[in-house]
Image: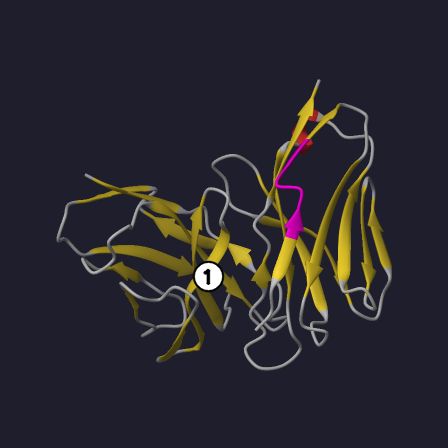
Amino acid sequence: DGGITQSPKYLFRKEGQNVTLSCEQNLNHDAMYWYRQDPGQGLRLIYYSQIVNDFQKGDIAEGYSVSREKKESFPLTVTSAQKNPTAFYLCASSGRQIQKLFFGSGTQLSVL
Amino acid sequence: GENVEQHPSTLSVQEGDSAVIKCTYSDSASNYFPWYKQELGKRPQLIIDIRSNVGEKKDQRIAVTLNKTAKHFSLHITETQPEDSAVYFCAASPPRGSYIPTFGRGTSLIVHP
């Protein structure tokens, strides 16, 4: 099944803990993105990467970190500095028609 | 940067009625306007898009219109069905730079049987 896979589906974070959300794609897309979704807030961009070993901050990057060591993978770490991490996190990718996004199924992160 | 406003935030219709969702954008250079549908607990999926060189595009029961002068675009759904119930997001994307789309806040469409 080709596409973009996020794991886990649900994740719980203890106070002071860093957690990492996984995002893998087999679409051979160059660009990958992380969005945060809160009720009534739409989709807000956290980080994006248009090429391996390079990434840029989005609108709400504080308290998050990413890496892009492989074309297929773009993991997101929610650090302890992110004081309000409870949200639905969506990963996306895009190919040559760079403006069209393909989304993963999301990870719901909650705080214990 | 680009700013996208989307209205209404909630839209409730009876099955068979039409639904219209409107978005405005601020950057006159934006040239690509997609619409995504997100069913409850699922991923957003592209349902229709339009580029700035086109005024209208249709795909069965859905259509999108674009007014570049007024910088607004709209999604039209005719003969609504309960399975159309979802959150719909509009977005605007510039032709240069990072090409990253800016999303509206979403419209929750509820179609009552």
Is residue A2 something one can see in this rendering? no
Residue A38 shows in this picture: yes
Above or below, comparing residue A64 to residue B105 in the picture:
below
Classify mark 1: residues with Cα within 10 Å, few (<14), some (14-19) or many (20+): some
Is B84 above or below relative to A26?
A: above
Q: Residue at x 46, y 55 (%)?
A: A4
Q: Quadrant for the N terminus of chain B, please.
A: bottom right
What is the tally of numbered marks visible in this picture? 1
Identify which amino acid the numbered label 1 is placed on. Asn
Q: Is residue B92 above or below residue A87?
A: below
Mostly what secondary structure, the magenta segment? strand
Q: Nearer the viewer, residue A29 or B90?
A: B90
Q: What scheme was used to colour the molecule?
A: secondary structure
Position of B46 relative to B32 (above/below): above
Q: Which residue is situated farthest in the left direction here?
A: A16
Q: Secondary structure at mark 1?
A: loop
Q: Position of residue B28 (x, y in %)?
A: 72, 74
